[in-house]
């Protein structure tokens, strides 16, 4: 969709950005889009009598079920002209309840009030100021990070965000440097920022924190090899080191092997008892539209791997749709298969299915095991008036020897309007 310069100026004036809008690059390189997401989720608790089963009015819940409509308005300006450029971004979020109630809430999609009722709607607006010098960009305000030590959650209606500052520099050839500090997080079903908390199975002493500091580097000496290192600290909770090696090896015509090795070392900070080493490796054989992968993850230490609680996704190989497989001393393996139907003449259609199994851990002093199976079928309309419309069915089965079993289905319909 094309919108002329006058309309862009009017929008920027409403946002209070008229003085900067006089700069040509600020407008010409700007983008405005609206992503819509219709989200339905049904989680069936198969044996709702375990200590971890969610409850309503003192009774174990049999299911959680919600249907909602989400809107994500994203504005990104260009930079003002000159050696030192300035710009601004904006993220507006709105979630609207279509169906939910206190007895069936709890999917994480909609905002739940203090009295247990589900909000009819909830919203958020987050601005971000940015400055560029050379190939270095400083951003201050709202962030939706996809960092290996802080990966925002976007698996429900609206994405999680963080508030803070970050600088990313690509001035050195083949090397990207990143550093920043987050001061607060807004959960995926919330309108407000709050302090960050730690989740780490078996650890004690965690406290709410308003400082998450991190720094890292990614070096890509070739198109087939990438190495990454990060160091992070959630103040008064834990310190963490992360290293990654990603390699693609061509083997024959249409055949290649992808290797992904990840290592986390996490230690205590403040009065916590965090102690975890996590080494994981995944090897994926790809042939035309097929991809077959196997992963193994080994954990050692007195606790599970720590991460920011509230929905943040730990960047571990066996963190999947429902469960993270990061209990204290838990070892796990995964078998995954993907297929892109474009290889057989149906572009836009894709399939993913995987199975993860974990053992060698305890729950309540008893030896325990668990497994999860995921299946995703997705289709993106390739042409016609509905071009770009995406449809996804996500199916989950989880079983644990001392935990609540679940069966789950999610249906997601998305479309993005690009205004300019």
Image: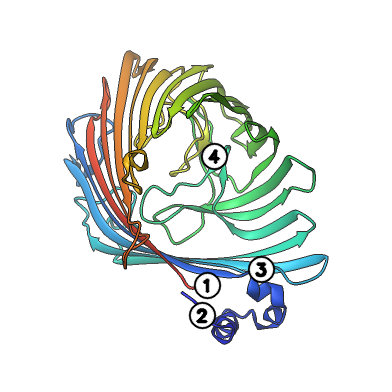
User: Residue extending furthest front?
Assistant: 253
- On the picture, is 3 further left or further right than 405? right
Along the viewing direction, whichever of 255 and 63 lies nearer the viewer = 255
Q: Give the mark, 4 or 2, whose residue is nearer the N terminus.
A: 2
Along the viewing direction, whichever of 250 and 82 lies nearer the viewer = 250
Which residue is the site of mark 2? 3
Which residue is rendered at x = 35% and y = 56% of the image?
382
Q: Tell me how far mark 2 sits from mark 1, CA to CA.
A: 6 Å
Query: Marks 2 and 1: CB-CB under 8 Å?
Result: yes
Which label sits in the foreground, 4 or 2? Answer: 2
Q: Give the mark, 3 or 1, whose residue is nearer the N terminus.
A: 3
Q: Tell me how far mark 2 sits from mark 3, CA to CA.
A: 16 Å
Q: In the rendered image, which quarter is residue 234 located in?
A: top right
Query: Marks 3 and 1: CB-CB under 8 Å?
Result: no
Q: Give the mark, 4 or 1, whose residue is nearer the N terminus.
A: 4
Which residue is rendered at x = 36% and y = 37% of the image?
321
Q: Give the mark, 2 or 3, whose residue is nearer the N terminus.
A: 2
Query: What is the number of the mark on residue 420?
Result: 1
Mark 2 falls on what kind of element? loop
Query: Measured along the vertical axis of the image, is residue 159 above or below residue 17?
Result: above
List x then y, in percent, for residue 331: 43, 17
Query: What is the number of the mark on residue 207?
Result: 4
Along the viewing direction, whichever of 15 and 26 lies nearer the viewer = 26
User: Residue extending furthest right?
Assistant: 83
Mark 4 falls on what kind of element? loop
Query: Marks 4 and 3: CB-CB under 8 Å?
Result: no
Which residue is the site of mark 3? 78
């Amino acid at each position: 969709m094309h919108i002329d310069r006058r309309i862009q100026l009017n929008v920027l004036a409403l946002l209070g950005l008229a003085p900067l809008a006089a700069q040509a690059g600020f407008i010409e390189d700007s983008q405005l889009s609206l992503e819509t997401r219709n989200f339905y989720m049904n989680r069936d608790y198969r044996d709702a009598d375990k200590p971890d089963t969610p409850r309503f009015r003192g009774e174990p819940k049999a299911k959680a079920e919600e249907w909602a409509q989400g809107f994500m308005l994203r504005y990104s300006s260009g930079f003002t002209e000159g050696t030192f450029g300035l710009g601004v971004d904006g993220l507006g979020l709105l979630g609207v309840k279509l169906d939910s109630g206190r007895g069936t809430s709890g999917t994480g999609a909609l905002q739940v009030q203090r009295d247990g009722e589900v909000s009819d709607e909830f919203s958020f607006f987050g601005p971000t100021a940015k400055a560029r010098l050379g190939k270095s960009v400083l951003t201050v305000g709202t962030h939706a990070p996809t960092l290996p030590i802080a990966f925002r959650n976007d698996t429900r209606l609206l994405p999680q965000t963080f508030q803070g500052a970050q600088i990313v520099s690509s001035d050195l050839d083949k090397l990207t440097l990143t550093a920043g500090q987050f001061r607060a997080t807004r959960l995926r079903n919330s309108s407000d920022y709050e302090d960050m908390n730690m989740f780490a199975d078996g650890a004690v002493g965690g406290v709410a924190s308003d400082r998450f500091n991190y720094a890292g580097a990614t070096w890509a000496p070739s198109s087939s090899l990438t190495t990454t290192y990060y160091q992070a600290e959630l103040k008064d909770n834990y310190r963490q080191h992360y290293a990654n090696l990603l390699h693609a090896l061509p083997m024959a015509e249409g055949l290649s092997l992808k290797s992904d090795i990840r290592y986390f070392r996490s230690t205590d900070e403040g009065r916590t008892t965090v102690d975890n080493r996590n080494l994981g490796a995944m090897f994926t054989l790809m042939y035309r539209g097929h991809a077959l992968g196997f992963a193994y993850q080994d954990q050692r230490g007195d606790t599970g791997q720590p991460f920011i609680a509230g929905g943040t996704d730990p960047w571990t190989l066996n963190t999947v749709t429902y469960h993270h497989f990061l209990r204290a001393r838990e070892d796990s393996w995964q078998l995954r298969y993907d297929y892109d139907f474009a290889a057989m003449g149906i572009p836009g259609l894709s399939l993913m299915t995987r199975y993860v199994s974990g053992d060698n851990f305890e729950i309540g002093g008893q030896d325990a095991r668990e497994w999860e199976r995921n299946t995703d079928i997705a289709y993106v309309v390739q042409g016609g008036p509905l071009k770009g419309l995406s449809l996804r069915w996500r199916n989950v089965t989880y079983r644990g020897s001392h935990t609540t079993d679940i069966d789950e289905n999610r249906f997601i319909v998305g479309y993005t309007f690009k205004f300019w």
